[in-house]
Image (cartoon, rainbow, N blue to C red):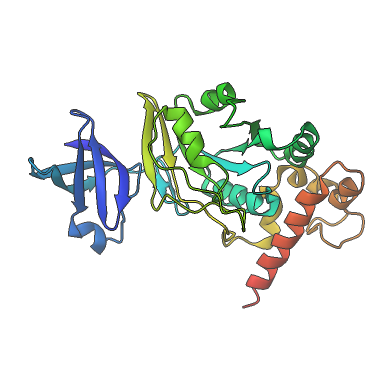
């Protein structure tokens, strides 16, 4: 029986079958452990029913994946949507950039979704939009509380499998409740002291919005590692920087210290946002130091 993994918890995988739309609790066959192939939420699989009454089965085949992500762990996605808040907690562009780099590395398009617009003024929205106006990513602003931007959000999701990610406390669970019109999960209470959400999700979960539209909810994150790329490749992950690399005096310009650098000139002219350039410079140094050890 063919189906799709909709959730994974502690070695158990919950498979929604294509024919009956029922969900079976399954264990993977031992062959997958031998081959070091771990099932992922979003995988298309074949299962054998071992107990009809208790809705239990075994995963006997995992179909070839369109793609797979390590963090968040998911398979067969069309795009990722990273969700940050415009306020409470304050957005962290450096953390967002790390997510964008990781997804570009995996070849997955990313939509940037900024929630809680009701907690900030128009000036703050414009300032944040200015940071990412040349990043090559679609940017939408929403308020899960007031409904602002919901039409744009649904347009971005329609007809796709989208993995949703973001730091704790940005309102992701509230947003999903709005999209599904159901209380699928208890919304976490925001910590007043740290301004961070108490994490209420512990695993990835695939949710069907309609026949052709799926979202994969994933646990919140507070840090992300940059993929193991050469530091000179980093510029290719910043479209606004990559577009200017041919204008530098040195062909192998790192854009960090060399003279006659088109990128640093663009930063001085505010053609590249200083926050994005600072993020690039910091990650470049991190990658450079990583290769020394």
Looking at the picture, tell me which residue is in the foreground, 264 or 48.
48
Query: Residue 81 in the image: x percent, y percent?
Result: 54, 39
Query: Residue 24 in the image: x percent, y percent?
Result: 19, 42
Quadrant in the picture for the C terminus? bottom right
Q: Can residue 176 be seen in this view?
A: yes
**Is 220 on the left-hand or right-hand side of 126?**
left
Query: Residue 101 in the image: x percent, y percent?
Result: 61, 50
Name which residue lies at 82% across and 60% down: 256
Name which residue lies at 80% across and 55% down: 251
Name which residue lies at 55% across and 41% down: 171
Quadrant in the picture for the N terminus? top left
Looking at the picture, tell me which residue is in the foreground, 266 or 242.
266
Question: In the picture, residue 20 is in which quadrant?
Answer: top left
Question: In the picture, residue 34 is in which quadrant?
Answer: bottom left
Query: Residue 279 in the image: x percent, y percent?
Result: 73, 55
The outermost residue toward the front is 192
As drawn, 105 above or below 153:
below
Name which residue lies at 14% across and 46% down: 57
**Is 239 on the left-hand or right-hand side of 6?**
right
């Amino acid at each position: 029986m063919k189906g799709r993994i909709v959730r994974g918890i502690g070695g158990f995988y919950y498979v929604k079958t294509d024919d009956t739309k029922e969900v079976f609790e399954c264990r993977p066959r031992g062959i997958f452990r031998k081959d070091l192939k771990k099932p992922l939420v979003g995988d298309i699989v074949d299962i054998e029913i071992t107990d009809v009454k208790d809705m239990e089965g075994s995963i006997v085949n995992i179909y070839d994946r369109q793609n797979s992500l390590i963090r968040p762990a998911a398979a067969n996605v069309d795009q990722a949507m990273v969700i940050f808040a415009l306020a409470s907690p304050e957005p962290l562009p450096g953390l967002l950039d790390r997510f964008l780099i990781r997804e570009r590395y995996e070849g997955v398009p990313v939509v940037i979704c900024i929630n809680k617009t009701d907690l900030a003024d128009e000036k703050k929205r414009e300032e944040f939009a200015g940071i990412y106006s040349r990043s090559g990513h679609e940017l939408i602003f929403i308020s899960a509380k007031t409904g602002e931007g919901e039409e744009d959000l649904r347009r971005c999701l329609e007809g796709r499998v989208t993995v949703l990610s973001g730091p704790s406390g940005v309102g992701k669970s509230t947003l999903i409740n709005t999209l599904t019109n159901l209380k699928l999960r208890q919304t976490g209470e925001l910590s007043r002291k740290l301004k961070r959400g108490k994490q209420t999700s512990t695993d990835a979960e695939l949710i069907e919005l309609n026949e052709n539209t799926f979202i994969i909810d994933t646990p919140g994150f507070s840090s992300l590692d940059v993929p193991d790329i050469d530091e000179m490749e980093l510029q290719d992950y910043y479209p606004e920087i990559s577009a200017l690399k041919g204008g530098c005096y040195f062909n192998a310009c790192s854009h960090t210290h060399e003279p006659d650098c088109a990128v640093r000139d663009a930063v001085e002219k505010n053609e590249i946002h200083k926050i994005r350039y600072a993020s690039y410079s910091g990650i470049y140094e991190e990658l450079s130091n990583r290769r020394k050890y």
